Image (cartoon, rainbow, N blue to C red):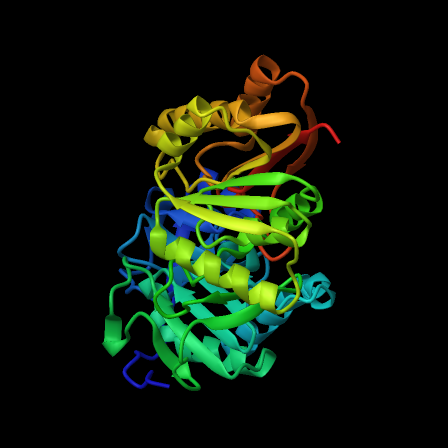
């Protein structure tokens, strides 16, 4: 490991007293303390110091990572009971996160999320498993003094052959660290392979988006695949083809994947061929089209094309509250296009990954459109987060997916 340049944790804690609203939030389990929620502090701490939180009666509330550069001034690690934040604490927290993922052990799955940030009591940190490779993504400089202890705990709890460090753009390259650097094991010769419900996938864990793959839609992909038998499928915003592969495995007659990124579609084609050779996919044709989703779907409507399953899984359209109205308009437009392309007795799948768009806003938007354009469709499922993507506070809730059709 190249972590010798990292600073040691500061033994001096920052004592912080909170305003009543911030007190209530911490007591209710919210993991963020904003700078406006602080009434006073013992001294000006440095990013990465441990902050001890107190209420107006000087009673202990919690302990967390102090971030002098962020409006989220304290990222809470533990509340309610005092704790020493050290290797042992990290190891116990990682064991609890791993236990939550126990249901995945019997699903022929070797790729999933081990740590989901705040919702696993490790704020601003993601750990994803890709078979024998772990990808650790850091979203705050506050982790720098504690990274060595965290990795020691990770090695104790979950043995892996390779560790890859990913750094968010806001973190930069501190203390000589680099995004994509190997902390343990060898440099991968290429994309790292893993299984998801028996399907073979691969990911560029050093340079790929996020940590290389989107694990959060695993359950929705499986559900779509279970509904795809004998159907022609249109997969919009297909990216590297995960929904498409599940549908092919489920017995779809054909799948068309549409995405604006030709390199992503090339990976999708490669994954499809890999699973065909492995005997996991049979009797399905797979085509791709590199195009803007809105334009491609509009052209298909003019061409009077129809599909027996339409899946629309767009990227997040709302990075801020101000962008929510535009996001809802985009979801509306996409759903209108998709419903016009849906054949009689078809299945329609629409997802949103924006936390800014509230769950009820999204589902109400889809319900209204279905009632207007395709009243013959019945709602089949409303889904949220998978077991490896827990969401323990409102801002963490982002994933929602609507399934409708006539079965």
Quarter of the image for the N terminus: give it.
Answer: bottom left
Q: Which residue is drawn at 46% across and 24% down?
A: 301
Q: Residue at x 32, y 85 (%)?
A: 2
Residue situated furthest top in the rendering = 372
The answer to which of 77 and 331 lies nearer the viewer is 331
Residue located 43% across and 62% down the image: 212
> Which residue does the image show at 36% across and 31% down from the upper left?
295
**In this rendering, position of residue 274 left or right of residue 35:** right
- Residue 314 to residue 145: above or below: above
Q: Measured along the vertical axis of the image, is residue 373 above or below residue 151? A: above
* Residue nearest the viewer, comparing 290 with 194: 290
Camera sees residue 207: yes
Residue 111 visible, this orientation: no
Q: Position of residue 167 (x, y in %)?
A: 33, 65
- The answer to whether 28 appears left or right of 269 in the picture is right
Q: Report x, y in % for residue 272.
A: 53, 59
Give the position of the C terminus as an image quadrant.
top right
Q: Determine whether, in the image, residue 101 is placed left or right of residue 291.
A: right
Horizontal and vertical percent for residue 313? 49, 41
Snapshot quadrant of residue 404: top right
Q: Position of residue 50 (x, y in %)?
A: 40, 66
């Amino acid at each position: 490991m190249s972590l010798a340049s990292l600073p040691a944790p500061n033994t001096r804690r920052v004592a912080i007293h909170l305003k009543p609203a911030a007190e209530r939030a911490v007591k209710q389990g919210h993991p963020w303390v904003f700078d406006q929620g602080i009434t006073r502090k013992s001294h000006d701490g440095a990013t990465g110091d441990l902050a001890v939180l107190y209420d107006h009666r000087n009673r202990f509330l919690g302990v967390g990572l102090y971030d002098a550069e962020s409006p989220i001034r304290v990222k809470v690690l533990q509340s309610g009971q005092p704790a020493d934040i050290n290797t042992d604490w990290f190891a116990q927290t990682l064991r609890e996160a791993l236990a939550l993922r126990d249901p995945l052990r019997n699903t022929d799955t070797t790729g999933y999320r081990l740590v989901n940030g705040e919702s696993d009591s490790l704020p601003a940190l993601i750990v994803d498993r890709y078979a024998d490779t772990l990808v650790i993504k850091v979203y705050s400089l506050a982790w720098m003094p504690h990274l060595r202890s965290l990795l020691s705990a990770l090695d104790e709890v979950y043995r892996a052959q390779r560790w890859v460090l990913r750094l968010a753009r806001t973190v930069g390259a501190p203390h000589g660290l680099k995004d994509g650097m190997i902390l343990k094991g060898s440099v991968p010769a290429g994309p790292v392979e893993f299984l998801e419900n028996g399907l073979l996938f691969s990911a560029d864990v050093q340079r790929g988006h996020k940590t290389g793959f989107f694990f959060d839609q695993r359950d929705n992909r499986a559900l779509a695949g279970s509904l795809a038998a004998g159907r022609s499928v249109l997969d919009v915003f297909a990216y590297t083809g995960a929904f498409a592969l599940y549908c092919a495995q489920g017995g779809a007659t054909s799948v068309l994947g549409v995405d604006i990124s030709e390199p992503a579609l090339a990976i999708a084609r490669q994954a499809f061929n890999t699973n065909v050779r492995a005997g996991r996919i049979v009797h399905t044709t797979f085509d791709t089209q590199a195009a803007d989703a809105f334009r491609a779907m509009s052209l298909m409507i003019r061409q009077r094309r129809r599909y027996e399953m339409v899946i629309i899984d767009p990227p997040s359209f709302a990075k801020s509250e101000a962008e929510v109205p535009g996001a809802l308009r985009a979801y509306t437009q996409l759903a209108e296009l998709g419903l016009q392309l849906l054949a009689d007795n078809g299945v329609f799948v629409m997802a949103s990954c924006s936390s800014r768009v509230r769950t009820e806003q999204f589902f109400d938007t889809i319900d209204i459109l279905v009632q207007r354009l395709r009243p013959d469709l019945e709602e089949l499922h409303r889904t949220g987060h998978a077991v490896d993507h827990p969401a323990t506070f409102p801002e963490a809730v982002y994933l929602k997916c609507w399934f409708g059709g006539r079965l």
